[in-house]
């Protein structure tokens, strides 16, 4: 998986350590720089790519919000502050999330999950033990046509793989996104989707008919691949 | 009667200005960080917060406290603020029998808070605080020095001195009208306040 390059911008050393401690628990997130003021972050970002900024508001010389306004092409930003009153302004500036100190790890993960949802790949952190995240799993975000598109998981009928791309057939539309089918499969709930063919991933609850050769979803007929036949059929038998 | 009303009014404002919520949340965040990392300092910080809250909620509602109590409050406040800085030099000089004299509560701390807010916190490369407290013949001498924020011109710093300082000035006028002198001055590097107050002895 692609590493997410993070910087922490906070003038308080202990506050920085907390975020650092949290990020260390996540394999794909790497801290590339810690800045104790916004100007240093500004300088660092001139010559280094950054994906995600953890930003405090109250800092010497330049506040987090001033810093954010000054950026031409801002990366994704998660605000971490003790100030309750700037949340509105923060969201006006398109921040991913607004965390209030002290931040619990659970709340932090929720912000990370938000980041993952809107960043280009549809990588989601799934923690089934965490009820907070459950409602978040109803949707996935995919990159399509230079936009991030939100799709309701319940609307997906089936997904067709085409080399590095997938066609997502939802209830009302079809979306093409650059992502391998295998990855798509990993990001959809395993108990609701089933791989029936090298090229097809289907939503089990959308099945309207099946036999040994294929599956029907409404008027669409899809073949069951040779290598998938045994597992698919035994799963389907269980459901009858 | 009018004086009493004024005092009451200022007291109400004082109550509001006593603690900034973000100071409390930042402090709790630092405490949280200390606990997460298993720092031994965490226990001491809990006691400091407790002592600070005790003073603010109970002691400061009395008209007068001992100078010792007021100074303890200032020290607790400084200890908690200190957590936010990695490279802060603090120099406190004390002289006198502080428990033998009384002072109106929350008179000294706003000056220290101001030093953090408008001086120390604005300049990361030059962080220091110098406090001199002397009690001689019932006269309290209180001096706070801190680096002057270079980005701020004089006009702005007066404007932004905030509710804390203007409120304490009002209270000094009401409680110690002819018995105090307050001198606030800044040169290009430092910002200094000197407060002289004639206090009452504890009987």
Image (cartoon, coloured by chain):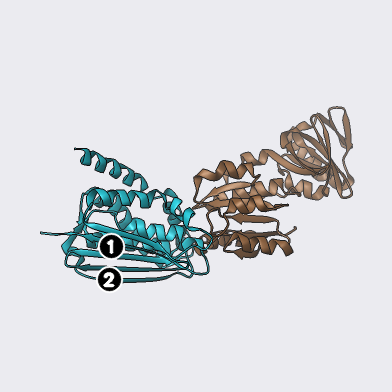
Chain colours: A brown, B cyan
- Earlier-in-chain disc, 1 versus 2: 1
**In the image, B128: left or right of B60?**
right
Q: Residues within 10 Å of mark 1 (few under 14, many from 20)?
A: some
Percent from the top left, x then y, of residue B197? Answer: 23, 60
The answer for which chain carries disc 1 is B
Q: Position of residue B182 (x, y in %)?
A: 30, 58
Q: Nearer the viewer, residue A97 or A168?
A: A97
| Residue A35 drawn above or below residue A69 | below
Q: Residues within 10 Å of mark 2 (few under 14, many from 20)?
A: few
Q: Are marks 1 and 2 in contact (CB under 8 Å)?
A: yes
Q: What residue do we see at 61% from left, 46% from top?
A: A97
Which residue in the structure is indicated by mark 1? B71
Image spot of residue B55 (x, y percent): 28, 54
Position above or below: B12 against A6: above
For image coordinates 26% across by 41% down, the residue present is B6
Occupied quadrant, residue B130: bottom left
Q: Is residue A133 visible?
A: no
Q: Secondary structure at mark 1?
A: helix
Asked whether, in this view, residue B107 is left or right of residue B37, the answer is left
How far across and down, in percent of the image, does residue B4 sit?
21, 41
Q: Is residue B132 left or right of residue B24?
A: left
Q: Which residue is mark 2?
A: B94
Q: Residue at x 74, y 37 (%)?
A: A151
* Relative side of B133 to B120, left or right: left
């Amino acid at each position: 998986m692609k590493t997410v390059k993070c910087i922490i911008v906070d003038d308080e050393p202990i506050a920085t350590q907390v975020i650092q401690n949290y990020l260390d628990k996540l394999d794909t997130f790497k801290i590339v720089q810690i800045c104790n003021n916004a100007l240093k972050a500004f300088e660092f970002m001139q010559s280094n790519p950054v994906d995600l900024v953890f930003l405090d508001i109250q800092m010497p010389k330049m506040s987090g919000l001033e810093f954010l306004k000054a950026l031409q092409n801002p990366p994704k930003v998660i605000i971490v502050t003790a100030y309750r009153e700037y949340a509105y302004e923060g969201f006006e500036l398109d921040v991913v999330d607004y965390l209030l100190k002290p931040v619990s790890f659970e709340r932090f993960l929720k912000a990370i999950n938000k980041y993952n949802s809107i960043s280009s790949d549809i990588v989601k952190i799934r923690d089934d033990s965490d009820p907070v995240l459950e409602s978040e799993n109803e949707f996935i975000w995919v990159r399509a046509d230079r936009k991030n598109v939100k799709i309701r998981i319940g609307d997906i009928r089936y997904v067709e793989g085409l080399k590095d791309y997938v066609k997502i057939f939802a209830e009302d539309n079809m979306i093409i996104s650059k992502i391998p089918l295998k990855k798509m499969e990993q990001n959809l709930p395993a108990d609701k989707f089933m791989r029936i063919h090298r090229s097809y991933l289907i939503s089990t609850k959308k099945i309207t008919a099946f036999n040994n050769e294929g599956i029907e979803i409404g008027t669409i007929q899809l073949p069951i691949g040779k290598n998938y036949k045994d597992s698919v059929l035994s799963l389907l038998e269980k459901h009858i | 009667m009018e004086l009493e009303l004024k005092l009451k009014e200022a007291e109400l404002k004082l109550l509001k200005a006593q603690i900034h919520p973000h100071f409390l949340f930042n402090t709790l965040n630092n405490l949280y960080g200390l606990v997460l990392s298993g720092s031994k300092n965490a226990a001491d910080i809990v006691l400091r917060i407790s002592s600070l809250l005790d003073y603010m909620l109970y002691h400061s509602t009395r008209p007068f406290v001992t100078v010792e109590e007021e100074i303890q409050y200032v020290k607790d406040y400084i200890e908690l603020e200190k957590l936010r800085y990695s490279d802060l030099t603090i120099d406190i000089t004390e002289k006198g029998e502080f428990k033998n004299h009384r002072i109106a509560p929350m008179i000294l701390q706003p000056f220290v808070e101001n030093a953090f807010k408008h001086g120390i916190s604005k300049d990361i490369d030059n962080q220091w605080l110098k406090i001199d407290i002397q009690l001689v013949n019932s006269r309290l001498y209180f001096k706070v020095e801190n680096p002057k924020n270079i980005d701020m011109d004089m006009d702005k710093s007066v404007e932004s001195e905030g509710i804390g300082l203007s409120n304490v000035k009002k209270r000094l006028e009401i409680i110690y009208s002819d018995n105090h002198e307050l001198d606030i001055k800044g040169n290009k590097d430092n910002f200094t306040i000197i407060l002289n107050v004639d206090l009452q002895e504890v009987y």
